[in-house]
Image (cartoon, rainbow, N blue to C red):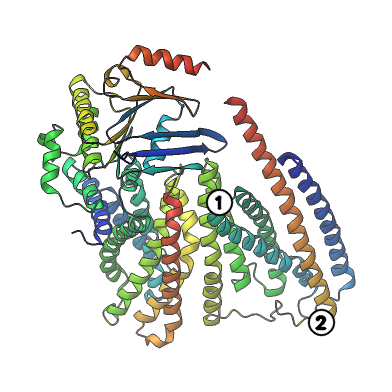
Amino acid sequence: MPQAEPAVTVQEVSRRFGHRWVLRQVSLEVAPGEAVLLVGGNGAGKTTLLRVVSGLLRPNKGSVKLGGAVGMVAHHTMMYDALTARENLTFFARLHGLSIRQRIDGLLQRMGLAHVGDERIGTFSRGMLQRLAIARALMHEPKVLLLDEPLTGLDDAASRTVIDVLGELEQRAVGLMVATHQLVELVGTAHRVGYMVNGRLAAIEPCAGDAGQVVERYRELASGG
Amino acid sequence: MTRRESALRIARRGAVVTGVALLGLVGIYIRALMFTPIERFQGPAQKIFYVHAPMAWAALLAFLVTGVLSLLYLIMRDRKLDLIASSSAEVGVAFSLVMLTTGPLWGKPVWGTWWSWDARLTSTLFIFLLFVGYLVLRGALHDPEVRARFSAVMGVMALALVPFIHVTVYWFRTLHPEPVLMKPERPGLPGVMLVTLLSSVAVCTVLYIGFLLLRYALTVLQDLKEEEMVDGVS
Amino acid sequence: MASPLSPILAIAAKDLLVERRTKTAFFSSLVFALLVLTILYFARDKTAVGDLDLAPGALWVTFTFAGMLGLNRAFALEMGNRAIDGVRLTPASATEIFLGKVLGSLIFVGLVELTAVPVFVLFYDVPIWRQLPLLLLVIALATVGFVSVGTLFSAMVVRTRFSEVMLPVLLLPFLFPPVVAAVQLTRSLLANRPLSEVSGWLSLLAGFVIVFSTFSLFLFEAILEE
């Protein structure tokens, strides 16, 4: 059976800010329906890597190839506080060339936001914003979804929703890259774990579903093991 | 050769060139004050012209270098081009400032006013303002890559603007002519004065190159120092 | 099927919607314009300068400074939640984003101008009706030139700390040709002179608009990328 084209191909990507190299020769592949966790300390390059994969940042060296459209959920909502949830989604839908009134309603429903669809998102809680950001990222049915610390500041219910969505996406052959500190919640959905140390991808290994193991392995790699 | 050695070599060359140019400048002063005849209508004050006009030329040259290198940077993204462009801007600011201060010193005795809105003076004023804007923008941006890219955009826009400034002032002046006794800019100068003027232009060009080399070398050394600091930390 | 204009219109509409919700920039610009018109009026010596001599300059100084207030908001609203990154993640090209922003600002600045003009006519008692269409053409042309360059520059300065000050510092030299041309044209039109007398200024203005709108459009991508 022919191998499906990877959702994400990162080849020898390096990126610097000023004189500091934040990413050094990172290479990895994410298959459709595969979830890869990125773990690493602050400043290890996780956010930068995701931004390069998304196309928001250009790599100084190397290249990124995507097997389809990309969606992203990041630390900033990347939406307009003064507009309502519906208005935000409609705006971004128009930019994607979609006229999907009904789909927007469906998305809001799925993410539990139907009751606040016409309120300005400036009033939303972190959990609501995150769910809306996911709705926006999924609107155009991307083949790749990138998430940067998706569970930060979320309560249990909101976290649950997000994890469920990730599971669904894996079923639908969407490639996922998730940068996170919160291993316990997400280690169950991951297929592989990528360990970032000082801008390098120190290792990328299958995930056994044990958060403790991941932490151990990270410590090993971070101390030069 | 390491970057550091290369920068120091450029600095040495720059010092030599600047030294030669400064000697040349002294020579020009001597020639202008002692050996060039006093202009009939304007008197001794006209001699400022031998410094003022070539300085304007050097400022324009600096501006063109910054503009062209900005365009090349946007195409080729070579950091060296950005460093030379910004060095040229700093040197250019100095030259245009000299030009703008000597202008009134010449203008008052000759035209009776400190400032005249003629095309050349006004264009140089705008070049000065554009240089200042360019440098202020650079100062406000801290990421070197963003700084290089944004100031390159500014440089290209500024380059495109200067012809428009010149035309605007020229047309405005033909509508509202100022009462001027002479048109001293025109090279209808007798031989001796022309030689002084042209030599001064040559000397100012060489002076510009010397300053540019020195400033560029300094920029490279600063850049190296920053790089070392970053490497030390990470 | 969405039309090719759709991203541009969507961005412009979104900008205007955000402005309508926040309501800050428009009224500030408008009040500013009225204040400048008033101050310039009282600052003149009535015996030395006729109204018709002063008026064109006053109008364009007003438009220029009020317009700059409006330009800053164009990218300031994108910085809050890094909304601009959300836009960059869509298929919208740098060109479409630029044109959308310019369109939004044109409508904004245009509304300020249209509101200021009747006040201007009132204060300075100028006979605007004689050459109204041509006058509107001049205002439109100069505004397009000013907004195009201003949009490019505001995208740059929004990343700096003192963006409200930096924008005028960078932009004003570029406004010299179009504003001088616009003032000459306005003066001539208000004095009911034939257009042929000032056709040179009209070509300068048109030339400026064509050259600098094009440059701004092409250079914008270099500002947007990271």
Amino acid carrying mark 1 in the image:
Arg
Residue B190 circle label? 2
Closer to the camera: disc 2 or disc 1? 1
Which residue has dot 1 on it?
A: B77
Residue C37 in view (yes/no): yes
Residue at horizontal 62%, vertical 52%? B81
Question: Front-most of C155 and A216?
Answer: A216
Element carrying mark 2: loop
B161 vs A185, left or right, is: right
Taking depth in this image into account, of A176 and B188 the one nearest to the observer is A176
Q: Nearer the viewer, residue B208 or C223?
A: C223
Task: Give the vertical position of C42 relative to A168 (above or below).
Answer: below
Instruction: Point out residue C115 in the picture as x, y percentages from the top left corner.
Output: 25, 63
**C88 left or right of C172 in image:** left
Front-lying residue, A73 or B54: A73
Residue C38 found in image quarter: bottom left
